[in-house]
């Protein structure tokens, strides 16, 4: 069995607990943020949540993948890989549908094998080049289950330096402890890469972005309400959302941030979407709190005036 691949230090530990848990979100992120850039959110009266106004950058510098350095399969060898990735992303929704419709035949043993047999429903017509190329067996610190995710590996490899081994079939890759190049695969068998990521709930969000490269869809998936025309309108709209829902969305942004950092992704679109989502969510909390404070002050003022009039 291939050894599990931990995508980063911000991943599940051997005990199964996450070293970047949701509860550590605020203390961890605020340690490198000036006190003037932090707000306290009264989620719990005795333990208010502290949030940085801006989403912190990655702890260490990330770099775009050098596409020319990736090993690719024979059918796309010699082609500009940027154009290949762009073409695949233009087919993103169809490829996602194919990946989602892929049925995996699970072995009876509890362990995850080096390869899995896959089948597509007869109703789906496809050609070999558009079928998933790998299965990611993803363990996370926030879920006891292992997610088996069929993917088109080159789309992940093109955005994550940590996953360059997904750019082609294992036999073409340099020797690796994660994918055994000596294992042979039948036409309907996919290599399995075991890996560890911090957040389970944001894996589908990230996967959709890697397939479609749609920043708008990514931003929409991070927020609790539809996108209006302007950021100002978005903040005003979100300020009427329940604080618990805003904090849930902030936690979702943080979960995606953890996974993006773990995968060493420098993609401008995903970072811009996370930055904007974080900024408008925190701004909405501030607007909501100020509105509630103003309303309470007005009510108290009105009550005092009423008492004074009654006394007269």
Image (spheres, rainbow, N blue to C red):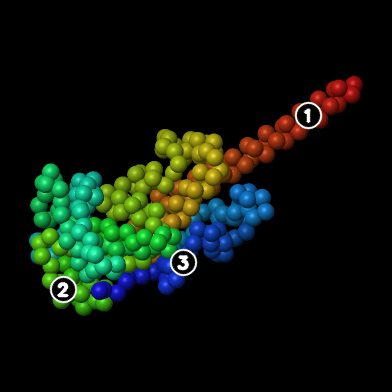
Give the left or right position of residue 279, taking residue 91 as reference.
right
Give how far apart the Cα atoms at labels 2 and 3 are.
32 Å
State yes or no: discs 1 and 3 in contact (Cβ < 8 Å). Answer: no
The residue that disc 3 covers is: 17
Q: Position of residue 26 (x, y in %)?
A: 55, 58
Q: Earlier in the sequence, mark 1 or mark 3?
A: 3
Look at the numbered disc 3 and give the secondary structure of its residue.
loop
Residue at 63% of width from left, 37% of height from top? 291
Q: Earlier in the sequence, mark 1 or mark 2?
A: 2
Residue at 54% of width from left, 59% of height from top? 23
Can residue 162 be spotted in the picture? no
Depth order, front residue of 91/83: 91
Give the left or right position of residue 49, taking residue 202 as reference.
right
Observer-side mark, 1 or 2, equals 2
State yes or no: discs 2 and 3 in contact (Cβ < 8 Å). Answer: no
Depth order, front residue of 139/73: 139
Give the left or right position of residue 253, taking residue 50 as reference.
left
Query: Alpha-carbon neighbours of circle 3 within 10 Å: few (<14), some, or many (≥20)?
Result: some
The residue that disc 2 covers is: 183
Can residue 47 be spotted in the picture? yes
- Residue 37 vs 183, above or below: the answer is above
Give how far apart the Cα atoms at labels 1 and 2 are.
78 Å
Q: Position of residue 211 (x, y in %)?
A: 26, 52
Q: Earlier in the sequence, mark 2 or mark 3?
A: 3
Q: Position of residue 302 (x, y in %)?
A: 76, 28
Look at the numbered disc 1 and give the secondary structure of its residue.
helix
Query: Alpha-carbon neighbours of circle 1 within 10 Å: few (<14), some, or many (≥20)?
Result: few
Depth order, front residue of 165/272: 165
Q: Quadrant of the C terminus?
A: top right
The residue that disc 1 covers is: 303
Give how far apart the Cα atoms at labels 1 and 3 are.
51 Å
């Amino acid at each position: 069995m291939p050894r599990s691949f931990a995508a980063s230090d911000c991943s599940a530990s051997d005990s199964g607990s996450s070293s970047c848990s949701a509860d550590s979100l605020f203390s961890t992120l605020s340690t490198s943020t000036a006190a003037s850039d932090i707000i306290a959110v009264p989620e719990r009266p005795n333990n208010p949540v502290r949030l940085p106004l801006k989403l912190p950058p990655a702890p260490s510098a990330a770099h775009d993948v050098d596409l020319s350095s990736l090993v690719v399969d024979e059918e796309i060898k010699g082609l500009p890989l940027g154009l290949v990735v762009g073409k695949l992303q233009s087919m993103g929704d169809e490829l996602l549908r194919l990946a989602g419709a892929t049925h995996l035949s699970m072995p009876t043993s509890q362990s995850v094998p080096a390869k899995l047999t896959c089948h597509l429903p007869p109703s789906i017509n496809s050609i070999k080049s558009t079928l998933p190329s790998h299965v990611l067996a993803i363990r996370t610190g926030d879920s006891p289950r292992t997610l088996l995710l069929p993917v088109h590996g080159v789309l992940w490899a093109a955005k994550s330096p940590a996953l360059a081994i997904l750019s082609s079939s294992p036999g073409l890759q340099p020797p690796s402890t994660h994918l055994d190049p000596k294992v042979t695969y039948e036409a309907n068998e996919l290599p399995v890469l075991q890996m560890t990521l911090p957040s389970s709930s944001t894996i589908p969000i990230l996967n959709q972005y890697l397939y479609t490269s749609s920043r708008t869809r990514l931003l929409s998936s991070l927020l609790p309400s539809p996108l209006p025309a302007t950021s100002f309108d978005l903040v005003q709209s979100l300020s009427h959302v329940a604080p618990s829902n805003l904090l849930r969305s902030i936690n979702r942004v943080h979960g995606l941030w953890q996974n993006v950092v773990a995968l060493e992704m420098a993609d401008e679109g995903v970072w811009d979407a996370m930055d904007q989502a974080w900024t408008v969510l925190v701004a909405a909390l501030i607007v909501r709190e100020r509105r509630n404070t103003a309303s309470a002050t007005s009510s108290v003022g009105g009550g005092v005036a009423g008492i004074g009039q009654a006394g007269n």
